Image (cartoon, rainbow, N blue to C red):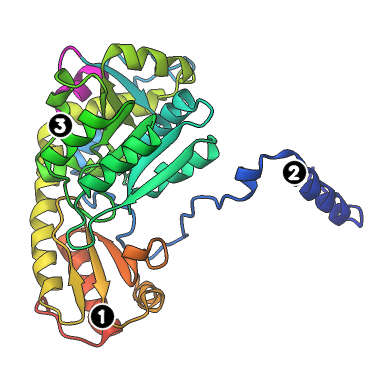
């Protein structure tokens, strides 16, 4: 029965608001929910999704596989049909244990819940993935940022080491390649952080498949290292599946916080199927890398913006003397959605982040940029 909109409704809503603000934790009240803008335009380049779907024959085989899933049963808690494929794809060393999450986001949340002793700090370079800070805040963990170098967005190692010494962080989060800057921190910089950190260092390799470089093998060398990966960027964002790999001693603790059956049966069956067709996934990754270079050249040849080299599946651009919000909404009006980062961090003034789409989507983006910025592009 729908609730009748009678005179008692409004006061009751006001009562609920004041009750919520009395009982909900202050840091939650102050938080803004992670915003995902509604968009039904043709060119969606805002969320680092892989633009390539599967060929019809593969889709048919996948659907046939799904018919065997028993939806009346709980999922396999060990994801035993899936785990070996994931370990192989991400080259997890035999000695490392793996824990799966409902996206890497859930794994970050589990890390924070486990490490959040009173006064515990998460340290991260900034700008980086916004969910690190957000999850730290809503789990009640202190979060401190160390600015990246301004010229090349590299890790400022002396500043990181000073912050580590001062804050003794329980957790250091390093995205490599980094979002939203697209660069890969130097191995020596990583080693310096691992050497100095008293607690855990998590290298988030969400974009590593596009860089062709991973520190997964380092798990055998560093007892304070965990490596995180996800299937979201390689063409399976809809499944929500992330992976944390590292020494069993760490992961058996975090596993206690994982809710039972967090990876649903359809995700397990679909991801296992996709990983049995690893070549298809690799082809899509390679295609994105090729298109990234073409798009980079086209953007770099424009005189009205700067673009940074990227080892991920997106490009960061800074507009020259233009209001990023207006350009963003101008592109949107042309049916192209990108991410406006202006205002999210001082280093990102006038910046947009553009996910690499299909060749056709990238052409449409460049055409829309021409229209909105009124400039020329070599692509057209
Ligand atoms: C660095 C980084 N890590 C993790 C994620 C989230 O991954 P998932 O979709 O597995 O939650 C993102 C998403 O944008 C990201 O940029």
Please tell me whether residue 254 is drawn above or below residue 48 in the rendered image.
above
Residue closest to the eye, 31 or 211: 31
In front: 93, or 285? Answer: 93
Q: Is residue 178 left or right of residue 24?
A: left
Residue 109 in the image: x percent, y percent? 45, 32
Q: Residues within 10 Å of mark 1 (few under 14, many from 20)?
A: some
Residue 113 % position (x, y):
49, 27
Q: Is residue 230 visible?
A: no
How far is disc 2 from disc 3 in space, using C-alphas? Answer: 44 Å
| Residue at x 17% of width, y 45% of height | 185
Q: Which residues lie in the magenta part?
A: 83-95
Identify the mark at residue 20; answer none if there is no mark: 2
Evaluate whether residue 376 shows in this view: yes
Tell whether label 3 touches label 2 (CB within 8 Å). Answer: no
Determine the CA span between mark 3 and mark 1.
Answer: 36 Å
Which quadrant is the N terminus positioned in? Answer: top right
State the residue position of label 3.
215
Split into quadrants, the picture shows ligand 1 in the one at top left
Residue 66 is situated, as x and y percent measured from the top left of the image, at 33, 26
Q: Between disc 2 and disc 3, whose residue precedes? A: 2
Q: Nearer the viewer, mark 2 or mark 3?
A: 3
- Mark 2: secondary structure: helix
Instruction: Work out whether residue 141 or residue 131 is closer to the camera in this orientation and state it.
Output: 141
Sooner in the amino-acid sequence: mark 2 or mark 1 = 2
Tell me the distance, in whole angstroms, between the alpha carbons under discs 2 and 1: 44 Å
The answer to the question of whether label 3 and label 1 lie on touching residues, with beta carbons closer than 8 A, is no
Specify whether tag 1 is near ligand 1 (CB below 8 Å). Answer: no
Query: What is the number of the mark on residue 63?
Result: none
Q: Quadrant of residue 309?
A: bottom left
């Amino acid at each position: 029965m729908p609730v009748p909109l009678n005179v008692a409704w409004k006061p009751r809503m006001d009562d609920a608001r004041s009750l919520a603000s009395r009982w909900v934790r202050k840091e939650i009240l102050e938080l803004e929910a992670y915003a995902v803008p509604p968009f039904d335009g043709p060119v969606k380049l805002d969320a680092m999704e892989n633009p390539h779907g599967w060929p019809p024959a593969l889709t048919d085989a996948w659907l046939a596989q799904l018919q065997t899933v028993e939806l009346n049963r709980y999922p396999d808690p060990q994801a035993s049909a899936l785990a070996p494929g994931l370990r192989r794809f991400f080259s997890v060393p035999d000695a490392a244990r793996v824990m799966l999450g409902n996206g890497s986001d859930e794994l970050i949340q589990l890390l924070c819940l486990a490490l959040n002793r009173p006064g515990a700090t998460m340290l991260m370079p900034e700008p980086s993935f916004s969910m690190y800070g957000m999850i730290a805040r809503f789990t009640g963990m202190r979060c401190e940022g160390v600015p990246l170098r301004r010229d090349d967005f590299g890790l400022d190692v002396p500043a990181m080491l000073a912050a580590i010494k001062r804050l003794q962080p329980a957790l250091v989060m390093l995205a490599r390649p980094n979002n939203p800057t697209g660069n890969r921190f130097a191995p020596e910089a990583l080693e310096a952080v691992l050497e100095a950190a008293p607690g855990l260092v998590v290298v988030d390799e969400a974009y590593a498949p596009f860089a062709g470089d991973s520190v997964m093998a380092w798990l055998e060398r560093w007892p304070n290292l965990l490596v995180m990966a996800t299937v979201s960027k390689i063409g399976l964002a809809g499944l929500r599946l992330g992976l944390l790999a590292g020494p069993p001693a760490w992961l058996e603790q975090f596993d206690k916080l994982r809710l039972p059956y967090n990876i649903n049966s359809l995700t397990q069956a679909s991801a296992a199927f996709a990983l049995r067709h690893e070549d298809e996934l690799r082809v899509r990754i390679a295609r994105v890398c090729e298109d990234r270079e073409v798009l980079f050249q086209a953007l770099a040849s424009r005189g009205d913006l700067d673009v940074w080299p990227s080892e991920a599946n997106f490009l960061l651009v800074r507009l020259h003397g233009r209001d990023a919000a207006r350009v963003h909404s101008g592109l949107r009006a042309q049916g192209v959605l990108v991410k406006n980062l202006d205002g999210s961090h001082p280093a990102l003034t006038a910046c947009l982040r553009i996910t690499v789409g299909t060749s056709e989507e990238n052409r449409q983006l460049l055409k829309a940029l021409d229209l909105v910025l009124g400039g020329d592009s070599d692509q057209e």
